[in-house]
Image: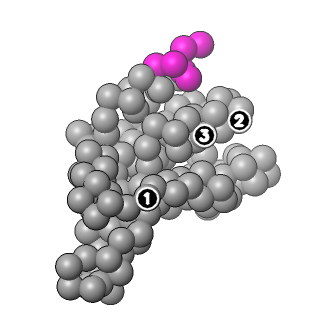
Amino acid sequence: MSIIFLSFFCFLVDIKSIYANTSTLDGIATNTYTTDAYGYDWSSNGTKAYGISGIYNLASTYRAIIKWDSVSQSPYFTYTDASGISHTVWFENAQSLNYKLDLVNSYNLSGIAIWRLGLENADYWTNIKMKFNR
C-alpha cells in the first residue's frame, strides 16, 4: 500500500460505482484514491479553505453543529457570520477518511493521495496506519 501526495483537490463522486465498473477514468489509472486534509467555507462572498484545526475553530466560534451527509460520507456545518452572510462548510475528518480508506481496501487500490499536507491532524495518520496495516 502506498501513499502518494498530489497537488490537486478531488471532489467526492460516486466512488463505489467508479471502482466497481472501470479501472481507468479517461485514461488515468484509478489505483489510487485522492482525498484532502482541509475544508471549504462557501458563502455568497466567496470561498475560503481551512485546515482541519481551523475548521473546528470556525465551528466553535459560531457555535455551529457539525452534521453528517450520508451520501458523501462527509461532515459539514452551516453558520451565519456577523454581517448576516450564510456559510456552508464541507470538510474531511477522521470519520470521513475512515470511510474512504475502507473503499481503498475494498477495491484493493494501491493507496491514497492527500492534497495539502500539513493541514491534517494526528487522527488522519492514526487511521491511515490502522487501515493500511496489511
Residue 66 in picture, x, y percent from top left: 45, 55
Q: Is residue 71 visible?
A: yes
Q: Is residue 9 visible?
A: no
Residue 48 in picture, x, y percent from top left: 26, 68
Number of the label disc, if any, that sits on residue 99: 3
Earlier residue among tags 2 and 1:
1
Q: Nearer the viewer, residue 105 or 53?
A: 53
Dot 2, crowdedness within 10 Å: few (<14), some or many (≥20)?
few
Report the span colored magenta.
129-134
Residue 129 in picture, x, y percent from top left: 46, 19
Earlier residue among tags 3 and 1:
1
Q: Secondary structure at mark 2?
A: loop
Label 2 belongs to which residue?
A: 107
Identified by mark 3, the residue type is: Tyr
Identified by mark 1, the residue type is: Ile
Label 2 vs label 1: CA separation?
A: 33 Å
Q: Residue at x 47, y 26 (%)?
A: 128
Identified by mark 2, the residue type is: Tyr
